[in-house]
Image (cartoon, rainbow, N blue to C red):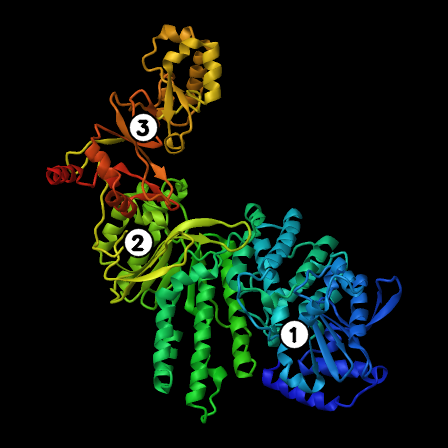
Amino acid sequence: MPLSLNEIRARAFAFAKEWADEASEDAEAKSFWDGFFTVFGVHRRRVATFEEPVKKASGNGGYIDLLWRGVLLVEHKSLGKDLDRARGQAFDYFSGLKDRDLPRYVIVSDFARIRLYDLEPDTVTHARLLLLAQGRGSDPEADSKRFIEFPLSELPQRIGVFGFMSGYEPQSFGNEDPVNVTAAEKLGALHDLLNASGYSGHELEVFLVRVLFCLFADDTGIFERGAFRQFVEQRTAEDGSDLGLWLAKLFDVLNRPKERRAKALDEQLAAFPHVNGKLFAEPVAPPDFDSKMRDTLFTCLVLDWSRINPSIFGGMFQSIMDAKKRRNLGAHYTTETNIMKALRPLFLDALRAEFEQVRGSTRRLNEFHARLAAMRIMDPACGCGNFLVIAYRELRLLEIEVLRELLKTERNLNLDVLALIHLDVDQFYGIELEEWPAQIAQVALWLMDHLMNLAVSTEFGHYFARLPLRKAPTIIHGNALRMDWRDVVAPQVLTYIVGNPPFSGARVMSSAQKADLAVVFQAGVALLDYVSGWYWKSLDFMKENPRIEAALVSTNSITQGEQPDVLWAPLLAKGLRINFAHRTFEWESEARGKAAVHCVIAGFALADRPTKVIFDYERPRSPAQAVGAKNINPYLVDGPDVTLPKRTRPISDAPAMTFGSMANDDGHLLLTDHEKKELLAAEPAAQTYSRRFIQVDELLYGANRWCLWLADAPPGALRNMPLVLARVRRVAAYRKASRREATKRLADTPALFGEIRQPASPYLVIPRHTGESRRYIPMAYEDPKVVCGDANLMLTNATPYVFGILTSIMHMAWMRAVCGRIKSDYRYSAKIVLQQLSLAGIVAKTKRDHR
């Protein structure tokens, strides 16, 4: 167990005083470093060795004064010796070390001075370190930024820089630290080797989660610093033959209270703490290791796991089980920035504001603290738990601020701060469809709990840890849309629902997902995105506890086109209110292999907040602009709660809009310029049946495309055009091979487009999809001899008045407000955008005004 910072500081004062006048390297250097390790509560003999033999870059042999493999190398000199020369000597040893033993830190000292190098800014490889040893690949300015030097007398003030020894390393919780990706990659390599050996499935998942915990525990003070690495290194054979059995024994020890352990238990195993928390409770057969697997585990052991950010590492760790995801490792976690877009307006901003109001009042601070401890948060699609982990971290940080204020207001009462830590992981609940991420979510919350306990220890100077683990989050492996959420948590105790349900649109859902939605909804399933089910299930909970508030990240299509009327109208009828919203933005990972989806966030409840906020984005990647609102409707705009039902006919006497004609031909009736030229050169008669064909690219960008329009071609004409006939036969074969009965029936008329809607008079063409950066949707009149494809919409009998209205800025504003979207691009809908518009009335008024 780590020492408290107060104890470390006291030991540092005593150590500096004891060694203030020492000068002789040969006589006392070993005692000096034994004492130095003791300052930080580390038993030097358990982690580091003196006089480690090694071959230097020159080929000559040498002895490292002190080596803590993978962590620290020390070169010690007598008083007054040149520390720059000592530095060169230290780096000269690196060529003789294995990669896994290369240290991150180097200390050179002459008793009176201590110089600490942190090599992390560099890629620590043999090639790099050899250059450093030879005085190349660096410059004095860079070196000066790489080390810190101070006199021994300042050690008590400098203990913070030795966090790698004490376990009190500062946490930035940033997404950018590459150690998160590196660590996941190393575990991925171990996973692959174990899986290839036949150790797979549930056993592999449980084993890797336990290894993750031990790696983290080894670097953060849960275990004695380096105890896990030392155990693996010292007790297991190099060929790996007994590693699985030793790990199984260790896991059993971690699951047992000390009083229930065998009296004759191996001393090294007995030193490990009781972890509990059911993490090591399930009996799982150990894997069989070989030397390569053991070496791979060592590549994990040498990383600094104290720098892992549990809120994003969980997602990366999850992705190692999926080879496709691992190719873009880092693309499959949710960035903290995006998570905070839901958490801050849901409760964090309000809590921060309330905390500012209660500062200085002991009674109100205690009441506020009690409210924090009473909060219960559920993510019913929790994945690897990143929403829950970040929410827990933020609440624990706020609790630290509360305790800091209480110490100010009651500084004369000698408060026991550690006894006032009330928040714990059992305040969090999750549901996850897959077992593997469900296990990760639970462990990630424990890891964050320990990091926050270290933050408490750093803040108040007293070591605080929760071992054995007595409380656990409730993370249930199950289908959230089919199970009763009351089996996870009682609605009466729940405070918030938050999360990021699966991004599956209505048209791309699997049959299983459609069946899930059918359990929740009685009608309208075919039009709804998968996330809709979570809104309905959340409403069920709110009916039993109207104080519950929720925020769900959703595909932006639930606020566009046809879905608002199907989803939101019934929700609003049952009393649901939207209290804050993020309009369309890009839900993007900041890691390599970026994965982006266009999303919205809806914060909702049965209770109506007096102050509502809409976060708007000029572009999907732009910063959010917060705007106050009186009411937020299903389109996430400030306006009355109205929704537009899908209409098959216009609400007024206006021209009908239809899709263009659909070929359904696998491309055999369509021609490029080159294909048309070749065909007409061989069969000039095909000129009669060749027509210009327009889809979106042809309409917007002037591309040329042609089609064979054979609606009026007699059978004899086809027999006289064998190349055209061959194309028609390929269309027939394609349609016959289809799984859709309707397409198979079209094989009887292979010379015709699958759906023909071509008008006999000039018509107005509107592209169904256009880029969101366009101020106006381009529209054009076309001759009836030009065949319009189904990527466009057609308006027949469109007068100049109609054309003027449809191309007006007014209509563009209407379209942007109610149309569907693909990502953030416009998806013009006749049944929503045009049919709802009283076009005839507008035309009549325009005519009157014109007169």
Q: In the visual, does 785 lie left or right of 388?
A: left
Question: Picture coordinates of residue 293 (x, y %)?
Answer: 70, 54
- Say above or below: 768 vs 710: below
- Secondary structure beneath disc 3? loop
- Secondary structure beneath disc 2? helix
Q: In the visual, does 588 lie left or right of 831?
A: right
Residue at the (88%, 66%) spot, across then down = 61
Given residues 621 and 293, the one toward you in this image is 621
Residue at the (39%, 25%) spot, across then down = 664
Circle nearer the viewer, 1 or 3 = 3
**First-in-chain label (2 vs 3):** 2
Question: Picture coordinates of residue 576 (x, y %)?
Answer: 25, 58
Circle nearer the viewer, 2 or 3 = 3
The residue labelled by disc 1 is: 224
The total of numbered circles placed on residues is 3
Residue at the (29%, 43%) spot, across then down = 819
Q: Distance of mark 2 from mark 3, alpha carbons?
A: 37 Å
The residue labelled by disc 3 is: 660
**First-in-chain label (2 vs 1):** 1
Q: Distance of mark 1 from mark 3, alpha carbons?
A: 72 Å
Question: Picture coordinates of residue 840 (x, y %)?
Answer: 15, 36
The residue labelled by disc 2 is: 536
Amino acid on which the number 3 mark rests in the picture = Gly
